[in-house]
Image (tube, helix red, strand yellow):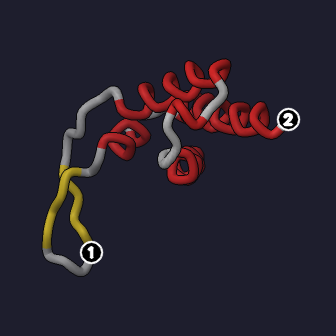
Amino acid sequence: MLDRGVWSAYLEFHPLRPEHFPPEFQDHFNWIMHELTKRPEQRTVYIPGTREWAPEGLVPANIRRMKNRTAAKFATAILDLEYSLRT
């Protein structure tokens, strides 16, 4: 599923900050991060093994609402950024 691909890519990507990128890639990084966190959390999720509920998180909330076409766009944007940095 594309949403899992976007989530996996985000997990690799999220420790980075704009200053980790050359100036020409910082806007691209900022756009991706903004789009993945722009909508608020709307529900809570059960945490297995804890008997507790917690907010689902900004990124999961945004990924959950994505259409497949949008998820593909984000996966491509993240891969394009990674490829650009490697070349």
Comparing 22 with 40, the one in front is 22
Query: Is 67 situated left or right of 26 in this image?
Result: left
Identified by mark 2, the residue type is Thr
Q: CA distance from mark 1 to mark 2?
A: 42 Å
Name, please, the residue furthest toward the bottom. 49
Q: Which mark is residue 87?
A: 2
* Relative image position of residue 50 (x, y in whole percent): 19, 77
Residue plotted at (38% across, 36% down): 62
Residue 48 got which mark? 1
Q: For marks 1 and 2, give the one nearer the viewer.
A: 2
What residue lies at 27% left-to-right and 75% top-to-bottom?
48
Please indicate, yes or no, whether residue 1 appears anywhere in the rendered image: no
Residue type, numbered disc 1? Pro
- Judging from the image, what secondary structure is the residue with disc 2 in? loop
Q: Residues within 10 Å of mark 2 (few under 14, many from 20)?
A: few
Q: Position of residue 86 (x, y in %)?
A: 80, 40
Q: Which mark identifies residue 8?
A: none
Kindly state the secondary structure of the residue where label 1 is placed: loop
Residue 43 in percent (x, y) is at 19, 46
Graded by Cα atoms within 10 Å as few (under 14), some (14 to 19) or many (20 or more), the crowding at tag 1 reads: few
In percent of width and height, residue 3 lies at: 52, 46
Q: Residue at x 23, y 58 (%)?
A: 45
Residue 47 falls left or right of residue 36: left
Q: Nearer the viewer, residue 73 or 1?
A: 73
Q: Where 22 falls versus 60 (above or below)?
A: above
| Mark 1 or 2, nearer chain start | 1
